[in-house]
């Protein structure tokens, strides 16, 4: 089985499980809560009435949270189970949305030049072997003047498996495919996965920015965040008195998230 299919099978299984846990607060969402976080909200700005494409949308919580803000949303994911779950959630929430199953590296023709905003957040690039293809798809989806918004776990934070004692278990930059075995989903450590192997890739900040620029987009914002409002890396991040999570190594804070915004001319 090739890397793409191996990952797809794994994410099909996760998509079936997710939402049956406290990590994805479906009940809270259906009661009106939003799953969106501060970094992407700031970069996206006003979205009401704008056409928004959410790449790697999983079960659609964030996509539908954008819809609640007035965006005209389309979600794209390679997992058929995730797309099915997202459509069902849209029906439950009575929110208009389109969900498409597709490889993010090969944008369907019907989505080209159709969007004011393309958004991808949290767990984006570790699943992408070809950053250039990903960035070209994102750029192709945008109308002239459209904006790409990306927020992802910082490559430095991705490297660290455990903070105390410090254990580093993956490279910072592209070193080719890495086979990773994970017995449970990040959303629920009590449920064992049947499909435990995935293939993942490491990409540096420089590689990400260069791919976006090479796709013809103008980089407007690039930020490395030293704190976050959510614990994206249990056993790695620590929570301070202000409620925010940080990656502190030898008394120094390292970046936990990277975000960028880029515009199609």
Image (cartoon, rainbow, N blue to C red):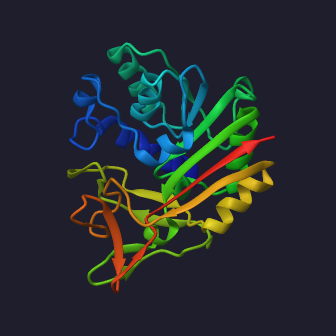
Relative image position of residue 5 (x, y in whole percent): 54, 46
Q: Can see residue 99?
A: no
Relative image position of residue 169 (x, y in whole percent): 42, 76
Which residue reaches farthest left? 190
Q: For residue 84, which quarter of the picture?
A: top left
Which residue reaches farthest bottom? 250
Give 137 or 179, whichever is nearer the viewer: 137
Q: Is residue 97 above or below residue 5?
A: above
- How many numbered marks are there? 0
Relative image position of residue 21 (x, y in whole percent): 22, 40
Q: Is residue 68 left or right of residue 175?
A: left
Q: Is residue 261 left or right of residue 35?
A: right
Q: Is residue 99 above or below residue 235?
A: above
Give 138 or 169, whichever is nearer the viewer: 138
Q: Can see residue 35?
A: yes
Q: For residue 35, which quarter of the picture?
A: top left
Please name the residue shown 59% across and 31% down the image: 53
Please name the residue shown 38% across and 14% down the image: 91
Q: Is residue 229 left or right of residue 8?
A: left
Please name the residue shown 55% across and 74% down the image: 172
Q: Is residue 179 above or below residue 106?
A: below
Q: Is residue 156 above or below residue 23?
A: below
Please name the residue shown 38% across and 63% down the image: 227
Relative image position of residue 198 (x, y in whole percent): 46, 57
Q: For residue 160, which quarter of the picture?
A: bottom left
Q: Quadrant of the C terminus?
A: top right
């Amino acid at each position: 089985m090739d890397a793409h299919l191996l990952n797809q099978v794994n994410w099909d299984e996760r998509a079936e499980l997710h939402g049956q846990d406290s990590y994805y607060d479906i009940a809270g969402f259906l009661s009106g809560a939003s799953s969106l976080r501060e970094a992407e909200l700031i970069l996206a700005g006003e979205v009401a009435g704008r056409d928004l494409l959410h790449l790697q949308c999983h079960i659609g919580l964030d996509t539908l949270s954008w819809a609640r803000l007035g965006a005209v949303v389309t979600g794209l994911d390679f997992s058929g189970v995730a797309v099915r779950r997202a459509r069902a959630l849209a029906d439950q929430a009575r929110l208009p949305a389109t969900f498409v199953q597709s490889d993010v590296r090969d944008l369907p023709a019907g989505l080209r030049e159709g969007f004011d905003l393309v958004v991808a957040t949290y767990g984006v690039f570790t699943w992408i072997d070809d950053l250039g293809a990903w960035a070209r798809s994102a750029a192709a989806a945008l109308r002239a003047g459209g904006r790409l918004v990306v927020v992802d776990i910082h490559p430095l934070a991705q490297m660290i498996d455990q903070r105390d004692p410090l254990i580093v278990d993956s490279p910072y930059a592209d070193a080719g495919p890495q086979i990773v075995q994970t017995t449970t989903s990040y959303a629920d450590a009590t449920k064992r996965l049947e499909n435990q192997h995935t293939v993942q890739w490491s990409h540096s900040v420089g590689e990400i920015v260069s791919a976006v620029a090479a796709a013809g987009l103008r980089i407007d914002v690039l930020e490395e965040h030293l704190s976050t409002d959510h614990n994206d890396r249990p056993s790695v991040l620590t929570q301070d008195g202000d409620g925010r999570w940080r990656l502190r190594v030898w008394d120094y804070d390292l970046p936990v998230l990277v975000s960028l915004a880029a515009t199609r001319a």
